[in-house]
Amino acid sequence: MERIIGPMRGFYIASYACPMGELGNIFLGHSRVFDSTKPRSFWDAKPIAEAIEPVTCASLEEAHHRALLTGLQQARCLADA
C-alpha cells in the first residue's frame, strides 16, 4: 500500500507500508522524498532522500503515518538546507 502527498515545502513525499513476511500482523513503513515533480508511484522515480522506519507497527495505517512523518521531517531539512 502506498501514498503520495505534496507538494510540501516544494517536495513530494511517498510512503509505502507492508507486512513483515512471516511475522504476521507487524508492519514496516518506508518513505521517499522527491523533488518538485510528482512521481507516478513510490517506485517510479529516483528519490532525493529515503528512509526505512526503524520501528515496526501493529497496523498498516500506523506504518504509513510514521513513514509520512519521517518524509516530512526529511523535506523540512532539505528545504532549510
Image (cartoon, rainbow, N blue to C red):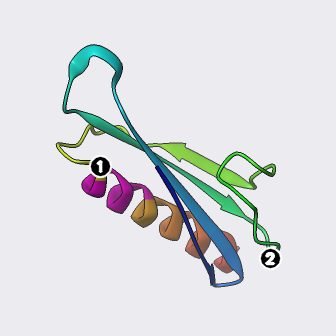
Q: Nearer the viewer, residue 80 or 49?
A: 49
Region rendered in magenta: 61-67
Does the magenta portion include 65?
A: yes
Q: Position of residue 66 (x, y in %)?
A: 34, 57
The tag earlier along the polypeptide, 2 or 1, is 2
Which residue is the site of mark 1? 60
- Left or right? Give the position of 55 relative to 80: left
For the residue carrying disc 1, how many other residues have a C-alpha within 10 Å: few (<14), some (14-19), or many (20+)?
some
Residue 4, quarter of the rendered image: bottom right
How far apart are labels 2 and 1 at the CA level? 27 Å
Amino acid type at image mark 1: Leu
Image position of 20 with respect to 52: above or below? above
- In the rendered image, residue 41, in percent from the top left (x then y), is placed at 68, 56
Q: Position of residue 22 (x, y in %)?
A: 28, 15
Would you say residue 52 sits in the magenta stretch? no
Count all numbered tags in the image, as a single digit: 2
Specify the principal SS of the magenta part. Answer: helix
Q: What residue is shown at x 80% (from left), y 76% (from top)? A: 36
Task: Classify the position of the C terminus by image quarter.
Answer: bottom right
Q: Quadrant of residue 5?
A: bottom right
The residue tagged with tag 1: helix, strand or loop?
helix
Residue under pointer 2: 36
Location of residue 18 in the rendering, given as x and y in whole percent from the top left corner = 40, 38
Q: Is residue 65 left or right of residue 31?
A: left
For label 2, the SS is: loop
Closest to the camera, between mark 2 and mark 1, is 1
> In the rendered image, which quarter is residue 6 located in?
bottom right
Answer with left or right where residue 11 lies relative to residue 31.
Answer: right
